Image: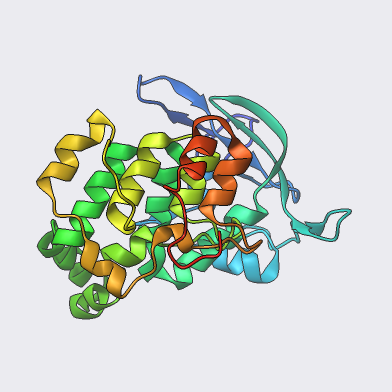
Amino acid sequence: MASSSSAPSCAECSERLVFENDDGIEVPDDLFLPCGCHFHWQCIFACRECLFEHCTPIAKTGSCPSCSKQIASRASDDTQTIITQYTNEGGFQPDFDIYRRILEDAFYEQHTEKLPGRAFLAQCSEGDVDGMMQLYVEHAFGAGDEDEADDDEMADGDAGAAVAERMTAPEMLRHQDPFSQMESGLHMAIANDHQHVAFLILFLASSASLNHLPQELQQFVASIPRPEKDLATHPDVRSLQTSMGKLPKHYALEKGGVWERMATSGLLDSPTGPN
């Protein structure tokens, strides 16, 4: 039901531009588009199992999903932008560009088999080691497959096809972000200074000799076999290059400190060279 006050409401659901946080307190949630329409964040990025239903048409047409007016524009460097004003619990952001997020979500809507890779890279960037462990176990050992297949069958009517398209654990560990210069999880771990993430990736996706793993990882790695056979059919993660030709070792040398010491020790050397 639309709000009876003069305050703007969401163009998608007609509700007030607030949401209730984990403490039960109402906080602002107002994404104001250049056309003048307001949306809740989750109403413009309407999510159903990480599929963003508005993003593909916005990416194709550059128009508002409510009023159909153009909301995309070109920046001074000729790149496409959608400049919004966003107010949420963290404050007011007057020049908030959502175009990259629109493109990214539209891409993954068309390539749903890559969604586990997207989730894995997000965890690498954020330093979420526990989440990485859980996601790896689910994909490497099939935990939760039966429930997921049931969900897919209910949603799509073809559970067999959904399972067949699922990204494998080795593929997920080596996924590279098409919207961040083809960075791998190891690149992101180094860039964001997450040492435990880097060691976990090296354990799962490289042939690196790891004699002294962080204590926080020892219980996990003791409970699973190191997937060394995957290296016969998948590249060592240390050999993955960004679109700029940079290896994880290059990131470490540029980062300095403990990362530079890891790089000069040979731990990050690509087994296929050059380094």
Q: Residue at x 84, y 54 (%)?
A: 75
Task: Give coordinates of residue 202: x percent, y percent.
Answer: 35, 50
Q: How many marks?
A: 0
Nearer the observer, 2 or 65: 65
Judge left or right: residue 194 versus residue 3: left
Coordinates of residue 272 in the picture (x, y in percent): 46, 68
Q: Is residue 252 left or right of residue 221?
A: right
Q: Please tell me whether residue 179 is drawn above or below residue 4 in the rendered image.
A: below
Q: Quadrant of residue 178?
A: bottom right
Quadrant (top left/top right/bottom left/bottom right) for the C terminus: bottom right
Query: From this viewpoint, which residue is outermost toward the right?
Result: 76
Horizontal side of residue 245 vs 52, given as left or right: right
Residue 249 appears at what percent x and percent y?
Answer: 53, 50
| Up-down relation of residue 76 to residue 57 (above or below) | above
Horizontal relation, residue 118 to residue 164: left or right = right
Q: Residue at x 62, y 64 (%)?
A: 243
Residue 160 visible in the shown view: yes
* Residue at screen point 22% across, 68% down: 229
Tell me what residue is drawn at x 41 percent, y 47 percent: 267
Looking at the rendering, which quadrant does residue 220 occupy?
Answer: top left
With respect to residue 214, does 173 lie above or below? below
Q: Is residue 14 visible?
A: no
